[in-house]
Amino acid sequence: MRPSRLTPVALCAVLVLAEGAGLEAAARPEPHPKVAQALRLAEAWLDATLAYERIPGVSVGVVVDQDLIWGRGFGWADVAVRRPAAADTIYGICWISKLFTAVAVMRERDAGRLRLDDPVAAHLPYFKLEATLPSSPPVTIRDLLTHSGGVPRESAQPYWTDPEFAFPTTEEIVRGLAGQRMIYPAERFYQYSNLGLALLGQVVERTSGEAYADYVRAHLIVRSA
């Protein structure tokens, strides 16, 4: 999806432009001139990119020390009714949840509760997908993090189907594994996999003893005082 691809790129561009330009001053009512210049350049770049890539709309924000110093919408939140995108427009989370999962895995690694080269099956005994080759190495946590595990792109449920887009429960994903098989040997090819990241979320639950949603709320989401 193009909108989800653009947003982190835009954020990186603004932050790189503003780096070294006195960001501590940006939190004041009047931003540092170099920061203001960087933001104007980012606005022009975003306007041009949306037009060139035919992207309907995005919302972008820049945060410094947990303070939102700039935010804007570009394009349309709803093309059909011509409703403009705003700084607080809500979008489908799409792959952004993968960032939380990856950080959670690394946090568990730092705590000594898992290693990146652990076989996934060591934490999830029900992970028993049929291998494509007898010589295939076991799928590791590192493989799933890098989308090189060779597992299917999706779980067995049709959750991309209108009108509900009902996401499967953990139990449904686990049951679906029984009818799935590897599509490539591990560590051989890049293959984007939503299933792989869902399995990593289950690994975090196993190693931490906490439900995934509770873990994210307790350890990863920063709340302002």
Image (cartoon, grey):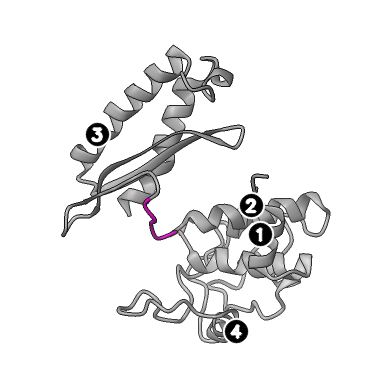
Of 219 and 33, which appears nearest the observer? 33
Q: Does 19 sit above or below residue 111? A: above
Q: Residues within 10 Å of mark 2 (few under 14, many from 20)?
A: few
Left or right, 139 with respect to 52, comes to right
**Alpha carbons under labels 3 and 2: distance apart:** 30 Å
**Alpha carbons under labels 1 and 4: distance apart:** 22 Å
Q: Which mark is residue 221?
A: 2
Can residue 146 be seen here? The reply is: no
Q: Amino acid at mark 1?
A: Arg
User: Split into 4 quadrants, where in the image is the N terminus?
Assistant: bottom left
Q: Earlier in the sequence, mark 4 or mark 3?
A: 3
Give coordinates of residue 107: x percent, y percent.
73, 51
Of 200 and 188, which appears nearest the observer? 200
**Alpha carbons under labels 3 and 1: distance apart:** 34 Å
| Label 4 sits on residue | 171
Q: Which mark is residue 217?
A: 1
The local secondary structure at tag 3 comes to helix
